[in-house]
Structure formats: structure tokens, C-alpha cells
Amino acid sequence: MAATKPSSRLQSPGDRNVKNIVLGDLLFTPWYQSIYPEDLVAKDADRLYVCRWCFRYSCDTLSFAEHTRACVHRTIPPGNKVYEHGGYAVWEVDGEEHKLFGQNLSLFAKLFLDHKTVFFDVATFLYYILTFTDPTNPENYHVLGFYSREKLSWDANNLACICVFPPYQHKQLGKLLMGVSYKLSGWETPGGYIGGPEKPLSDLGQKSYNRFWAERIARYLLCGKRPGNKLEASPQKANVSKGARKNPPPELMTVEEIGLATGMLTEDVITATKFMGVLQPDTSPKKRKLPRLTGAEDPDKGIVMTIRKSDVQEWAETNHLSLEDPVKDEGFLGEWLSVPIPDDIEVGSGAEQ
């Protein structure tokens, strides 16, 4: 799926080619139209039945019932499991190996995404499917959402499209998928990967990423750990005067330093710190020079930021931020199981107390 001009307007019922969606035993309304073939899905279709395991679709109840009884993915999703923790799992599905699955998933996701265009050539994409399995019945799983990414991105994108299906939204699942996307892309590249989602983002996507980025930076500054490491609170400095604790000195850090420490693009670092309201103008006459990252020059990288740790702490408390990373390193499987946890990146001690 490729980005197009974003829109914040939900389509009226008359603009949608499907009135209602039946996903398994769930009935809900789509937000936008999708380009289902008209010979299979009429423009005025009242209900579209979608398989909750493979996303094959039909407007005929008998055909749908026959398929669900024989669906090859009824007990296990396609692809390889790369993450599992607390009943949730993420499966990597190669679009080249599972073309029909990728096409059907893209058509279904388009019903809830206005700023994406469906590409039927899914061979160049990887799909990461988020599932939840009933602990009392290991073969009864639900697909909650997914994200996709291009196998080769020239724009440092670690995510092309993300969608949590409406019945499962408002459960922090988007943050889980975003965290997995940064984790996997960071581990795939020696020395770490600096990247972010494909842009432009939708209004909802921008809002979600603003919060995710802010939390990612806050965990780094407050815990002194790159996201993904075991989080431990930074020790308090000894013999700090009462006045110093009340008005702590700021730590100067460049946008590039924070980006290197969190795996984030500099533009995303700036967006997040502005969103948090913790960015202060730097009045220092001298600016430190840092080694440049490979790739195109970014004028934002050398920008020096002044951030007080107390401001970040206040933001975290106000927004009820948990310092525990929602993505657990011990949950990764397969080739990721032996990936060493990155050491702290010594580009700065974080904001001062």
C-alpha cells in the first residue's frame, strides 16, 4: 500500500461500496471504500463476509461458510512467528510467498485507511500480522491488525502501512506494532537503523506516532537506556543541593544524538519534543560537532536541544507513562532470539536531573 494525499474526512455511507463488514462473528461498519472487484462485490452490497484468518471475501453466506470450514489458516497464520508475549504474537508474512493473503489483507485494510492506495503487486512487501490466542484454546486465534514494510526502502522507512482493526482499537496495540517495527529494523542493520514510518501520515497516524515517539524519547532520557534494553531508573546524583534539585541544570543534546540513541529520524525527534512541550531554545554560543550519519545531509541533525529531565518527568507523570517498554526482548523468536541487546550509546547521559 502506498501513501497518497491524507484526508481526515470519513466517507458518507453513499460513498462506500460496502455497508457492513462481517469479520468472523463480528459485525461493524467500514470507514471508506475499497476497490473490491465489482463482479464479486456489488457497489450496493449490504454485507461483505470476510474470513478472519485469511481475509478471503464473499457476499454469499453459503460460499463464506464453506470456506471458513476449510480455510488452510484456520489454526495457524501464514508466515513465521517472530514475537510472542502475553498471548499476543507477531507473524512475518512474505508477500511474494503469500500473494493472495497479502492482496486480500490490503483490500480489507483499505476499508479503514483513506490515505493509502492498494498495490496488488505485494511481492515487494513484508506483512507483520498481530494475533491474539485464547489461552484455553491454542488453536483459536484472532488477527487484530498488522503493519507492512517494503523489503527495500530508499527513504529509511521501517513501516509502510499500519492498521489495527476497529473492534480491537484503543487497546495500545498500535504502540506494540510500532515498537516491533523499530526493534526489527534496528536489529537487521549492523550498528542500528535510523528510520521511521512512510510519510505523509494520516491525521490519526500522526497523532499516534507523536505519542509513541514522545514515550520512546522519555524512556531513554529518564532511564538512560536505549529503548529495548532492560529498563532501570537512572541513579540520583549524590550531594545535590535543594536549590539544584528544584531548578536542575539542562543537558545539551543534539537532535542527532537523541536520534542515534532511539533509532529515530531527526525530524521525528523534533516533532516529538515539540509535542511534549519540553524543547527549550539553546542560547549557547558553541555547538558540538558530531560525526555524520551516512546518507543525505540533514540540516536538523546539528540542532542543539535543551531539555530538562524534570520537564520530561513531569510530562511522563501527567500522561501516566509507564517506563516499562511495551515490547519485550524476551518475546522475540527465531533468528531474533540470539540478537544481543544493544549497549547504551554513549552520546550523552540524557537530560540532567
Image (spheres, rainbow, N blue to C red):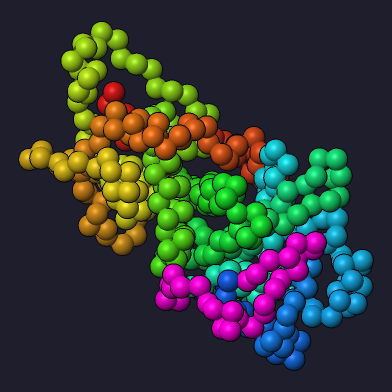
Q: Is residue 186 above or below residue 12?
A: above
Rendering coords of residue 26 (x, y %):
75, 62
At horizontal 25% and vertical 36% (from top left) the residue drawn is 307
Q: Is residue 292 left or right of residue 59?
A: left
Q: Quadrant of the C terminus?
A: top left
At horizontal 60% and vertical 37% (from top left) the residue drawn is 328
Q: Quadrant of the N terminus?
A: bottom right
Residue 167 painted magenta: no
Q: Is residue 274 above or below residue 150?
A: above
In the foreground, 282 or 171: 171
Q: Quadrant of residue 76?
A: bottom right
Q: Is residue 120 above or below residue 235?
A: below
Q: Is residue 139 left or right of residue 212?
A: right
- What's drawn in magenta, residue-wise? 4-30
Query: Furthest-front residue in view?
Result: 13
In the foreground, 192 or 126: 126
Q: Is residue 75 left or right of residue 91?
A: right
At horizontal 77% and vertical 47% (from top left) the residue drawn is 133
At horizontal 42% and vertical 28% (from top left) the residue drawn is 223
Q: Quadrant of residue 147?
A: bottom right
